[in-house]
Image (cartoon, rainbow, N blue to C red):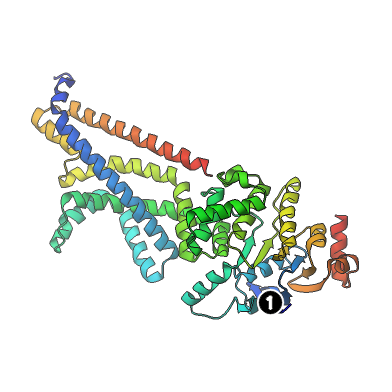
Amino acid sequence: MQGLDFSIVPEYLPLIGKGLWWTVVISVISALFSIVAGMGFALIVLYASPVVRYPVRLFMWLFMGTPLLLQLFLIYFGLVQIGIDIPALWSGIIGLSLHFAVYNADIFRAGIASLDKGQTEAARSLGFGAWQTRLYIVVPQALRNTVPAVGNMMIALLKESSIVSMIGIAELVHSAQLVISETYRPFEFYLTAAALYYVLNLILEAVLRGIERKVELSR
Amino acid sequence: MTDVRPMIEVRGARKFFGPLEVLKGIDFSVARGQIVAVIGPSGSGKSTLLRSINHLETLDGGEVWLDGVQVNQTLARRPFERHINSVRQQMGMVFQHFNLFPHLSVAENITIAPMKLKGMAKADARALALKMLDKVGLADKIDAFPARLSGGQKQRVAIARALAMQPKVMLFDEATSALDPELVDEVNLVMKQLAAEHMTMVIVTHEMRFAAEVADRVIFMADGAVVEEGKPDDLFRNPVQERTRSFLKKFLNG
């Protein structure tokens, strides 16, 4: 039996740090994409003509009903077969973004539906067109009202981003595995990775609380 | 007077909600600078009538005209959207539940339409907002958020927001019905002030006393039709129709 020995960790911190960096980069980009695309999907589902709406709903339904890992494999390994070669990093970002965009879309759709009809009427009565009303009045309020729910999704996204290690992206879990294959110290390095995820989530939660407080002031 | 064309003209307005006929062919007109109060029991169609003036309700029959332009003309979807947006910019509407934009400050609530729809510069729009707020006695609230205002203050901001578009007419849809009694006067005062400035106004209201005080003409509606209309003195003191009499009696005793 081998005891726990964390003294070996500092030596490998630069490598782990690189993984941490990529986890942050992938998560932040995917989070932003998932919010923008999610709002786009929500607006399409609510307002677009059936020709656009139904394909998007079908796509959302397919993405909600299948695992993220499978989606990543399809984007990275599958699409190559039909001549679409997307680098691993972008495959990971696209997969994460779309996967969470679908969930965000559902949250935004409910957020928009719960807005008071009087908001739209007030905007229209001032002379705003339908899309101007959505842009200036509906979307900003829906974004504000859904901060807690979307925030939870983003915490999930940060953790789920570890799955992109399966298509060879050297993020936090992947770099921990690299180090473990060299040192045969799985416990120490998995725990290190876990601690780092925890720290990242603490920071993310603090940011979300800050946003919530700011939003609360204007309600 | 050279311009005798009415500011608002409604001809044969009909509207159905499902099988229910809520407007049964209404005709009325409002002259430039005139103030018309519309009274009547709940469900009489008075709010629907007001909302159909700026096309928040689509009429099933009849015509609405604003200053010589037909509001509900038959156009393809996109041209109609352009038409109705420009017509609505000329009509201010004040709602029972204020409908201020909660995510925007008082200043932004007032400036967003002049800036986005008329391309007004930010500094000019803010100066305009200050002027309008001054008019409704709330200049000190310019940077507050709606959540921090009382109901009466919210409604006064809503009036300022509508006025900032320099509308030709103002439509009030039970503007004081959602207010605590002690907050009604501050809103009525602003409306009286607008009346003194000869703003053309259509006021749907439950307040008979206010209607009597401010209106040039009162229209009594019941069951989707105009039962009686006239000068406030005549209509309130000597109503001709039995329906009007019983409504007013109930109101004055209740």
Q: Chain of mark 1?
A: B
Quadrant assignment for the C terminus of chain A? top right
Residue type at mark 1 is: Val
In the displayed orientation, state which residue is furthest to the left: A182
Residue B48 is at least partly visible in this image:
yes
Relative to B1, is A126 on the left or the right?
left
Expressed as whole percent of the image width and height from the top left, the position of residue B120 reads 49, 60
Viewer can see residue B101: no
Which residue is under mark 1? B10
Compared across the picture, whether A63 is left or right of B186 comes to left
- Eyeballing the image, is A7 above or below B93? above
Q: Which residue is nearer to you in this view: B192 or A22?
A: B192
Q: How many marks?
A: 1
Q: Which secondary structure lies at badge 1?
A: strand
Residue B88: image quadrant is: bottom right
Quadrant (top left/top right/bottom left/bottom right) for the N terminus of chain A: top left
Which quadrant of the structure image shows residue A124?
bottom right
Quadrant for residue A57, please give it.
bottom left
Task: Residue at 53%, 60% (x, y): give it.
Answer: B114
